Every structure is written in C-alpha cells, then in structure tokens.
Image (cartoon, rainbow, N blue to C red):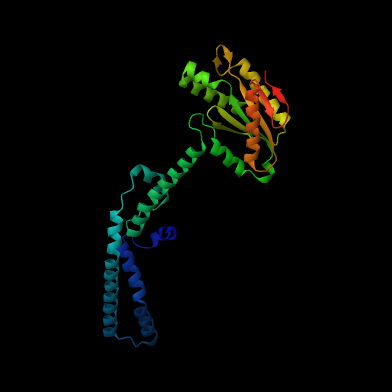
Amino acid sequence: MQFYLATSFIFPRPLRLRLLTLCLATTHLPLLGYILWGTATGRIAWAEFIILTLATMAGAAGALIGIGALLDPLHGQVNALNPVEQPERKRWAPTLREMSDIFTRLFHRVRGPAATTREQIDALNIAANEDALTGIPNRRGFLAQLDALPLAGRKGCIAIIDLDHFTQVNEMLGHEEGDRVLVDFATRLSSQTRRVDIIARWAGQAFTIFYQDAIEEEASWSLARIAERMRREPVGTVNGQPITFSVGLCAWRGGPVMTAIGKADEALYRAKNSGRGQIQRAERPAVSLR
C-alpha cells in the first residue's frame, strides 16, 4: 500500500481513470507494434489501423466496465466502515497522500482505527505496570523490569520496605492522609536512590527496591540514610511520632527472583516482630534504623 501511495502521482487521481490509463496502455501495445511495423515497411493500411484502434478502445472500455463492476462490492464494504474521527485522523493523515480512490479510502478507514487500537494497547500496558496512586511501577512492573535486565545486571540486593503502624494513619487521620503519606514516601524513595535502582509499590503500604550491583552493606547504608531523613523530615506522624519503616533485605545473584523476594519477605516479617524500625537481612543479624 505504501508503494501504491508513493507512485500515485504517476496516474490520474480517480481510480477509474487510473484503470482506463492502464487498460489503454496495455491493450494498445499491439496497435503500437502495428504502427511501428507499418512505418518501417511503408505497408500501413489506414482502414485496418482505424478498425484496430476502435477495437482496442472498445476492449479497454469493456475491461474498465468489468473491473468497475467487480469493485462495486468493495465500495460497499468501505462505505459500511465507520468513518475515522477527525481528531484521530490528524495524528497520521499528514504522512499520507490524500487520494480519492477506493484503495486509499480503505487504507484510511482501516489504518486510523488500527493506530488508535495500538495507542489504547500501549496505554493499557502502562496502566497494568504502573501504580495509579504513586506513579511508580507496581508489582507487575517491578518484576517486568527485573526480567528485562541483561544477565550481567541481575545482581544486587532486593529490599522489601513496609511502613510501620500504617493502619493507624488511615484509622486516625483518614484514608486521604494515608494516600498522601504513600505518595510522599514513594517520592522520598525515588529521590534518595540511584537511577539504576528499581523502585516499586509492592502492595498496600509495602514498597520494594532493587539495588543493582550493590552488596548488602551498601543497601543497608542507603536505607539508613532514608530512615534518618524520615526522622528529620517525616512524611507523616502517628501520635506525635514520625512514621518509620521496617525492611527485609536479601542479596540476589541472578537466580529465581521470587526466591530472593521470598527471603526478603521473611526477613521483613522478622523485622516487624522484633520491634519495627529496623533492617533484617536474610539469615543475618538485624541492623537498627533508630
């Protein structure tokens, strides 16, 4: 179709005239051969020439009528298609030559909805991988980004972070305040980590960070720095105390990622049961964040 549009300037704009031009050009080849032969030999017969010309034109006209009859059902199908809305057409119409024949009309009618469908699919993919509240990746988006990493990049530390006593924020201050705390905490994590690190909202008040190419000590130091700022500039308070968080941390060296996440989750559970506000490493002693 792109070739058809690119070469459309060679022929007249209406389709029927294009077909007539093509028919005349092809059916007149014998007549042209006769003229060349007669000119070269001087034996051209004008009566035969006129008869042959009329017969050739009649054949071309008959071919055009027949082709037009065959195209009538296609015209009906194109007209039955819903016309493309003008705002949608503006996105792609400048890249096409506006032609009046049936093929281009069909191309226009089909390409517009197809482009819209692709945009809708892209938007759905973004929505499926992004947390609507905080704007950072959700669980699915986090796992998808890890899966997209090259083998050399699949090493570092995975941290699962859970805000302490978050249910009290919703119960005492309301869900709107709880949502604000989650948004501010996500912003805090994004501003205090590296660009290569992957941050996501894991579930509810739980977040996760993949510290790429980092050892546990480096990840612990980063999380301690975030905790220190949380005490100085809290994202919220409960009973007059800054909101804190607990962390489960596990090294990941390219094995099954869910295994590492499971160990980090177990470490988080130990941190919660050991007084909160601390980092628990997988099968390692706890590190206090206070």
| Direction front: furthest residue | 273
Q: How many marks?
A: 0
The N terminus lies in quadrant: bottom left
Quarter of the rendering containing residue 287: top right
From the viewer's perspective, tell me whether residue 173 is left or right of residue 228.
Answer: left
> Which residue is drawn at the image coordinates 48% and 18% (left, top)?
171
From the viewer's perspective, tell me whether residue 144 is left or right of residue 37.
Answer: right
> Which residue is drawn at the image coordinates 59% and 26% (left, top)?
162
- Residue 37 in picture, x, y percent from top left: 38, 84
> Which residue is drawn at the image coordinates 36% and 63% (left, top)?
11
From the viewer's perspective, tell me whether residue 285 is left or right of residue 196.
Answer: right
Out of 150 and 162, give the one closest to the viewer. 162
Vertical arrangement, residue 163 with respect to residue 128, above or below: above
| Direction top: furthest residue | 240
> Which residue is drawn at the image coordinates 34% and 44% (left, top)?
86
Quarter of the rendering containing residue 231: top right
- Residue 159 in picture, x, y percent from top left: 64, 31
Would residue 219 be seen by someone viewing this image from the given angle?
yes
Vertical arrangement, residue 209 with respect to residue 110, above or below: above
- Residue 73 in picture, x, y percent from top left: 28, 62
The C terminus lies in quadrant: top right
Out of 32 and 89, give the one closest to the viewer. 89
From the viewer's perspective, tell me whether residue 235 is left or right of residue 50.
Answer: right
- Residue 169 in picture, x, y percent from top left: 51, 19
Would residue 212 be seen by someone viewing this image from the given angle?
no
Quarter of the rendering containing residue 105: bottom left
Vertical arrangement, residue 132 with respect to residue 225, above or below: below
Out of 91 and 94, give the one closest to the viewer. 91
